[in-house]
Image (tube, helix red, strand yellow):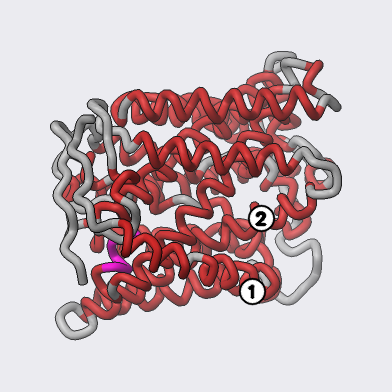
Amino acid sequence: MLPAMSERPSRKPLGFWACWSLTVGVMVGSGVFMLPAVLAPYGLLSFGGWLITGGGSILLALVLGRLASRTTRTGGPYVYAHDAFGDLIGFLVAWGYWASYWIAIPAVAIAFVGYLAVFVPALSGNAVLQAMTALTLIWTLTLIAIRGVRESALMQIATTLLKLVPLAAIIALGFAAGSADNLPAVNPSGGPVLSVLAATALLTMWAFAGLEAGVVPADSVADCKRTMPRAVVLGTVFVTLIYILATAAVMLLVPAGSLATSTSPFADAARGFGAWGPPLIAAGALMATAGTLNGCIFIAGQLPMAVALDRLAPAALARRNRGSSPYVSLLIAATLSSLLLLTNYTRGLVGAFTFLAMMSTLATLAPLAVSMVAELRHSWRSARGWAGVALLAGLYSLFAIVGSGFEVIGWGLVLLIAGLPFYYLGRRRAATPAVGAAD
């Protein structure tokens, strides 16, 4: 195994709140604003689904925190896989994980444009204007990330706090002015309890995708072995509580029959605030998508840099500027995302793009499963308690992977196999040491 290259930025610009906002900000996206309506047909049993996915995600966060406490290298799940299983497995994990982010970037940008149409009606039905707006957003956030890690972190903290405002407002309104009469029945579908719990767990688990984001940028985090574990665990617990409380608040505010057919459940719930309620929710959804997009762009730059520092990818990917930003990696990710975005607006390929977005979610789950196996291998003899936690978390991640569907899993394997030529090419071209912290 080749030794890692040495490249250290001049300062550590990220602290607890930056890592916490990465974890929270990437998880809390636009999808949460639709979940109360999706879960309404399953009644109060849907909270069982939240408890399953929240508990499973907290287990994942605990194991990720333990893994993060043993390294100072950037890369998160890639580093854990690389250290446990060697170059090839590490590279393939990084390859699929990185692809999941640059595939997700255009999807999140399109979601942002969809919510922006509430305030800019000219966007509705105008595919060219939508595409240009989404591209502008991607490149604006990329340029912020290129300017420096600190600037990207400040943007992440700001958007995370802003996206939580409408959710907190709905929670407060629901528990202050909601009615228990609006709550749905315990099991209105009448299906077997275990089947209902499994269905709701599959629906809600995607809301936790991205929980690992806070452990990726280790090389830029002050006291990373202590900061990152706290950030990812506390961030995941916080998001679990927000999801459960927000879902309960919406159910208290919107009658069950109306909620099941709602296309904007949070906006319907916000009507209790008056005329300004629905625009508040639309603004919150904008902040949610912008924060998720900012986090995705940040991680899409960090991962290739981590692989290049281990000499498994071209050294150029590890180049950083005076702001400690891996600008080459960021430019490549933004370019690939932009091309995929434009492909989405080509007639006849919308379905293919939607499928790729689903595959993106799968590709974030596979590295987590490998990370759990890495911890299980490490702790099996020395810390049986942690080995048990890793085993449970690994089983949960496998359940999530199987829930994505076998067709998506098959294409995910194709994506990983496609990375093999780049692995062998990268090893041959990565012999030159990486450029220093500032070019």
Vertical placement of residue 122 versus 106, above or below: above
Residue identified by numbered label 1: 410
- In the rendered image, is residue 134 in sight? yes
- Does residue 32 appear to the left or right of 62 in the view shown? right
Residue identified by numbered label 2: 356
The residue at the point 23 percent across, 35 percent down is 15
Q: How far across and down, in percent of the image, does residue 335 sit?
A: 54, 38
Q: How far across and down, in percent of the image, does residue 414 sit?
A: 59, 70
- Which residue appears farthest toward the bottom when viewing the image? 381
The residue at the point 39 percent across, 68 percent down is 424
Tell me which segment is drawn in magenta. 77-82
The quadrant of the image that shows the C terminus is top left
Q: How far across and down, in percent of the image, does residue 301 sit?
A: 39, 42
Q: Main secondary structure of the magenta part?
A: helix
Question: In which quarter of the view is residue 151 placed?
Answer: top left
Q: In the image, is residue 347 part of the stretch drawn in magenta?
A: no
Q: Earlier in the sequence, mark 1 or mark 2?
A: 2
